[in-house]
Amino acid sequence: MKTFYPTPTIEDYLGIIYTLSQDGEEIFGARLAELLEVTPPTVTVTLKRMVRDGWITLDPKKMVSLTRKGIDASKTVIRRHMLTEWMLSRILNIPWSQIHEEADKIEHAISDEVEQQLLRTLDDPSSCPHGNPMPDMESISNFWKPITEFNENNHLIIRRIHEFLEQNNELLILLEESEIIPGKEITITQLLPLNKTITLKSNQGSVIFGFDIAKNIFAEKL
């Protein structure tokens, strides 16, 4: 039987499908087209190829599920991306707001040997620099909640910036400048459910986010 290895494009699909599945989201082509910023026909063609090569299955409603082979490949690409982010951050001192974009350019070239060396060099991290758990380490986030689920005057420590916020470089720059990043402490000074806005205070001052962003920032109460 012919062995198929994922192309960089397929790896991108696998990573997003795995992330959506970990969030408990039902996955359809339209959602993938939105996140990948490609046309629905392009997604349809790619998904058919992924079914053919054994990465995914499609049910009668066209909902996407990873096969065992697809899960393993997804974990590999996500782990290599996260390790690349740590390499860029710790070794090359690339700013936190830039490492996701730079890692996207490098991750597909990481070999098994380089991955193992990075794991040893970086002391086998349990999350990426943005706080997203490494594959099979998701339990570390069990007690983290979106900051929209806390109350005014709660004092929090930021734990995670969701993967999908990493696609917005301008937002990452704002988060970095405002110290709304993993490990930093904040206070919720205003929470307006009707307006769907939340005001956070850090050592760098105050910043306001809409709930669409804030629900993807996770924290723990201090």
Image: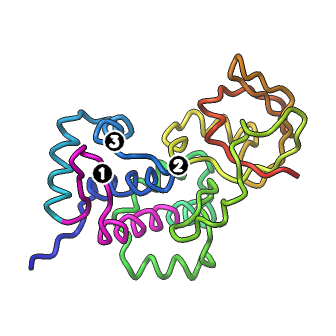
Q: Mark 3 near mark 1, Cβ–Cβ under 8 Å?
A: yes
Farthest left residue in view: 1
Secondary structure at numbered mark 1: strand
Q: Which mark is residue 64?
A: 1
| Relative to 11, residue 193 above or below | above
Query: Can residue 183 be found in the magenta stretch?
Result: no
Q: Which residue is mark 2?
A: 163
Say which amino acid is labelled 3: Leu
Q: Which residues are magenta?
A: 54-82
Residue 148 falls in image quadrant: top right
Q: Is residue 120 left or right of residue 6?
A: right
Q: Residue at x 62, y 72 (%)?
A: 125
Please name the amino acid that badge 1 sits on.
Val
Q: Is residue 57 magenta?
A: yes
> Residue 149 vs residue 88: left or right?
right
Residue 49 percent coordinates (x, y): 15, 55
Residue in the image at 88% along x and 40% along y:
154
What residue appears at the point 66 percent right and 43 percent down from the top-left corner?
Answer: 217
Chosen colour scheme: rainbow
